[in-house]
Image (spheres, rainbow, N blue to C red):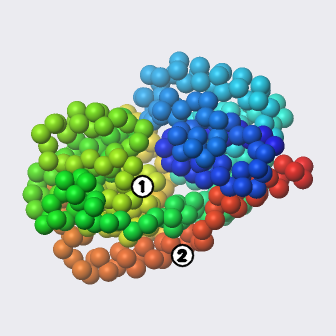
């Protein structure tokens, strides 16, 4: 059978790659065409468009790149029509994917959505569009299933795919890691995860670097997004900076870190699942932030807090995201054994709430079963 998968960012490429592997395991003759990245390509998908060309975030950024986005829509539609997939699988990225879903449904394609857009947070009216144009919603957060049930959307909770990623991690050799990255064995590590898109990395990293100057007794390491060149980071931090960079070693870095400063997104959940104390930060374009704040219908922006429905990790958003506030929270996390103990207990509860491993396998089984029976 033929599958067309669309992922618009790094996390989508990761989850899409695991889905590709699960589909191929169950359907050895599968032909899989995709918009994604190297992870999907390595697992056997024919990636025809890289997500680097799709990563626009915020209202202002989208408006300034509207021509490019519209061109991508037309390219995608034409490619899907020529490929004629048995299943069109959309991964998050709602601004693009929901428009493709509307078009695909009219053309008679079977539409699956793996990893729901955050319609429960904002733009809730999208749930009515999803009900009309998506044949099956495969959600990864437990509260999403309850949300969709209220609107009679055909939805299945498959579990969170990050549990599978974390389960695959091998213990890192501390000595080798320190030596390879020219780190001092006498100082504790603090990880900096500034995001995966150019706009947010520029905005976030400049503030994070101010924290480095305030905490000379620690060493800071930036986890570089694979979608961005190292030269981009070096331009921001300066060639003479003592802040180190690691590429494709985020999990190894987190395993060895005493704490982390993390841009809101999937990375906040990854950090928690690896039991690392974290402070979550986010700063957007001012216009984008005002619009988003007006539309948002959630108490938190961090996935950890959203899943637990309470404040587990500190969120420093917009004007609250200052170097001083980040430093104060880091010092509290690093120096209070009581806080660390409570945080680890909360993290264990989080893991229990997310369920078992095998999300990609369950998603693949559902998709294949649906298109073979219909």
Q: Residue at x 54, y 45 (%)?
A: 39
Considering only vertical position in the picture, is 178 above or below 109?
Answer: below
Quadrant in the rendering for residue 253: bottom left
227 left or right, relative to 101: left
Mark 2 and mark 1 in contact? Answer it, CB < 8 Å: no
Picture coordinates of residue 203, whole percent (x, y): 29, 39
Q: Secondary structure at mark 1?
A: helix
Residue 227 visible (yes or no): yes
Relative depth, front residue between 123 and 188: 188
Residue name at image x 26 percent, y 47 percent? 245
Disc sitting over residue 352 in the figure: 2
User: Which labelled disc corresponds to residue 267?
Assistant: 1
Q: Residues within 10 Å of mark 1 (few under 14, many from 20)?
A: many
Give how far across and how far down residue 345 sits, in percent.
Answer: 40, 79
Q: In which quadrant is the N terminus drawn? A: top right
Task: Work out whether residue 106 or residue 192 is closer to the camera in this orientation and state it.
Answer: 192
Outermost right residue: 374
- Left or right, 17 with reference to 337: right
Q: Is residue 338 above or below residue 260?
A: below
Q: Position of residue 192 (x, y in %)?
A: 28, 53
For label 2, the SS is helix
- The answer to whether residue 318 is seen in the rendering is no
In the foreground, 129 or 347: 347
Q: Is residue 75 above or below residue 347?
A: above
Mark 2 or 1, nearer chain start: 1
Q: Residue at x 58, y 30 (%)?
A: 49
Q: Nearer the viewer, residue 278 or 321?
A: 278
Question: Residue drawn 44% across and 66% down?
Answer: 170
Please tell me how many numbered marks the rendered image carries.
2
Residue 239 percent across, percent down from the top left:
16, 36
Residue 283 sits in quarter: top left
């Amino acid at each position: 059978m033929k599958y067309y998968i669309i992922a618009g960012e790094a996390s989508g490429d990761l989850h899409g790659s695991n889905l590709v592997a699960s589909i191929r395991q169950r359907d050895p003759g599968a032909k899989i065409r995709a918009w994604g990245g190297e992870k999907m390509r390595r697992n056997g998908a024919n990636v025809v468009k890289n997500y680097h060309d799709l990563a626009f975030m915020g209202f202002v950024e989208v408006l300034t790149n509207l021509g490019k986005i519209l061109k991508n829509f037309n390219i995608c539609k034409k490619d899907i029509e020529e490929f004629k997939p048995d299943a069109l699988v959309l991964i998050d990225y709602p601004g693009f994917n929901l428009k493709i879903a509307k078009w695909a449904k009219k053309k008679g394609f079977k539409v699956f959505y793996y990893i729901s857009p955050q319609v429960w947070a904002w733009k809730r009216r999208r749930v009515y569009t999803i009900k009309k144009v998506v044949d099956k919603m495969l959600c990864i957060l437990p509260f999403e299933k309850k949300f969709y049930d209220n609107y009679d959307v055909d939805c299945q909770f498959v579990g969170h795919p990050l549990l599978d990623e974390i389960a695959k991690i091998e213990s890192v050799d501390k000595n080798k890691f320190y030596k390879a990255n020219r780190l001092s064995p006498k100082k504790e590590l603090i990880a900096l995860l500034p995001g995966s898109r150019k706009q947010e990395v520029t905005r976030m990293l400049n503030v994070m670097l101010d924290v480095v100057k305030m905490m000379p007794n620690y060493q800071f390491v930036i986890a570089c997004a694979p979608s961005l060149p190292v030269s981009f980071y070096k331009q921001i931090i300066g060639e003479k900076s003592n802040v180190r960079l690691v590429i494709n070693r985020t999990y190894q870095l987190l395993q060895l870190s005493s704490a982390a400063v993390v841009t809101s997104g999937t990375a906040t959940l990854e950090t928690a699942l690896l039991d690392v104390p974290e402070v979550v930060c986010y700063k957007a374009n001012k216009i984008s932030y005002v619009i988003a704040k007006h539309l948002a219908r959630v108490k938190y922006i961090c996935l950890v807090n959203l899943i637990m429905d309470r404040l587990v990790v500190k969120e420093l958003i917009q004007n609250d995201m200052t170097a001083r506030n980040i430093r104060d929270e880091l010092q509290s996390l690093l120096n209070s054994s009581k806080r660390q103990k409570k945080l680890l207990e909360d993290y264990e509860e989080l893991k229990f709430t997310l369920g078992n491993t095998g999300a990609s396998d369950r998603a693949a089984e559902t998709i294949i079963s649906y298109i073979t029976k219909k």
